Amino acid sequence: MALLKQLRLFVTLGLGLACLGTQESLWAQGNRSPNVIVILCDNLGYGDIGCFGSKLHRTPNLDQMAAEGMKFTDLYAASGVCTPSRAALLTGCYPPRVDMHKSDIGGAVLQPVSPKGLSPDEITIAELLKTKGYATTIIGKWHLGDQLPFLPTRQGFDSFYGIPYSDDMTPREGKPWPDLPLMRDEVVIDAPVDLNTATRLYTLEAIRFITENRQRPFFLYLAQAMPGSTRAPYASDAFRGKSENGPWGDSIEELDWSTGQILKTLDLLQLKEQTLVIWTSDNGAPRRNPVQGSNEPLKGWGYTTAEGGMRVPTIAWWPGTVPGGTECAEVASLMDLYPTIAHLAGAELPQDRVIDGKDILPLLKGEPGAKSPHEAFYYYMFDQLQAVRSGDWKLYLPLENVRGGWQQEKEAFAQPRLFNLKSDLKETTDVAKQNPAVVERMTRLAEKMQADLGDDENPAPGRRQAGNFPEPTARTLPQ
């Protein structure tokens, strides 16, 4: 049964649309905050969809979404890796600030049955929105801790339907992990989950949530599991083997379909003009052999601080508020969603802690002359500050032991390197020697940030602690 047909069935079975007239009048009076949907793909590259340049993947729904909304061409995840990136999105903070820049055993991402997780003392965007009467849910991949105190239902979300960590974290030699669990709230309902059905099931769950909560403001965080971390991404029967780029392309074309179903649902329920939808990715496509994803026209791969690792394709859609067919080339970040959404909901930001994100509502609205609110954006890998962007300039800092996926280019970090990203997206021409004043200014910006956050060996006062659960247990099916 088609998903929209199922939606109409929901309505027929008693959910009804009688409220819509009242709802519209409330909007006319400005008495209701907007709905917010954030769709976050996993490892999807900058050049993997049509409106960002892909010639391989058919993405008509995303292309139409961009035609009706705004493309952000210079928007960054706060990390080239998923756990830190997701922590930054939900807290509005650079990953080292909330101690989510590495796992408890030194890797970049949290593993199953880890004692570490996003601290319950952090205030997520979902928790802020709850203070304003929002219904909140996460559907999809969490990856910020799989122990009870760290689950989404303890971090401001009314409900959770999805997997607690990455799709590739399954039992293997040397890794006695449990079968990959599908959870509803705090209970495992299936294991091992069939990831071929993930995108379809998440889409149906999202439609159900939107439908059931259409009479109140809602926040839907749809953290898609695809194209994912496995070497062969998953797709349902309707999409498997149908693209021109193998399993990677199949999964992306199904993600496009999913987005189309959600936008059509908003149209059917007359919620288009009351809903901000942000579509993006948690980091760039990782290096694969053979190549699968694309970060073109950017340099490099996910899991690095190259542009291809951290600059993510982003579309904002909100008919009547976000101007259609537009592009924004100002520097922005997924961290900025935190204060921007809070502003839209009328929620006050926490005053007892630093929030690194900035309100980018003027950019979203396409206000004349609107500029990036960031003096600089900082590229972190683990605890290591590797680069700084200010305006069109990007400076790689000199590092003796560069971390992350730079193994083939470690020698390049022997000295500072400067690139003009406006004219050199591929980061091919180092112009540091020709611009010593720019290098000096950006080095001072880096020193200021390092004085705030430091690193693991020399932590600075701007850091907060992650959560710790000393006796972790596996998420498994109830006995």
Image (cartoon, rainbow, N blue to C red):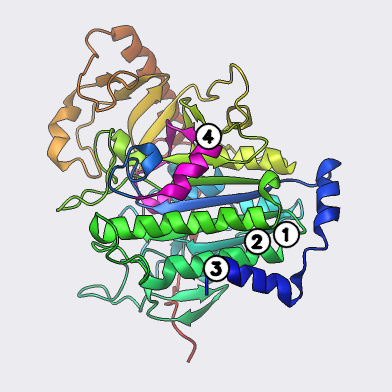
* Mark 2 touches mark 1? (CB < 8 Å): yes
Span highlighted in magenta in the image: 58-84
| Residue drawn 50% across the image and 74% down it | 183
Q: Is residue 30 visible?
A: no
Q: Where is mark 3, residue-wise?
A: 3
Picture quarter containing residue 179? bottom left
Q: Nearer the viewer, mark 3 or mark 4?
A: 3
Q: Where is mark 1, residue-wise?
A: 214
Q: Position of residue 13 (x, y in %)?
A: 72, 77
User: Label 1 vs label 4: CA separation?
Assistant: 24 Å
Q: Nearer the viewer, residue 394 or 97?
A: 394
Q: Amino acid at mark 4?
A: Met
Q: Amino acid at mark 1?
A: Arg
- Of labels 4 and 2, earlier in sequence is 4
Horizontally, residue 49 falls left or right of residue 318, namely left
- Of labels 2 and 3, earlier in sequence is 3
Secondary structure beneath label 1 = loop
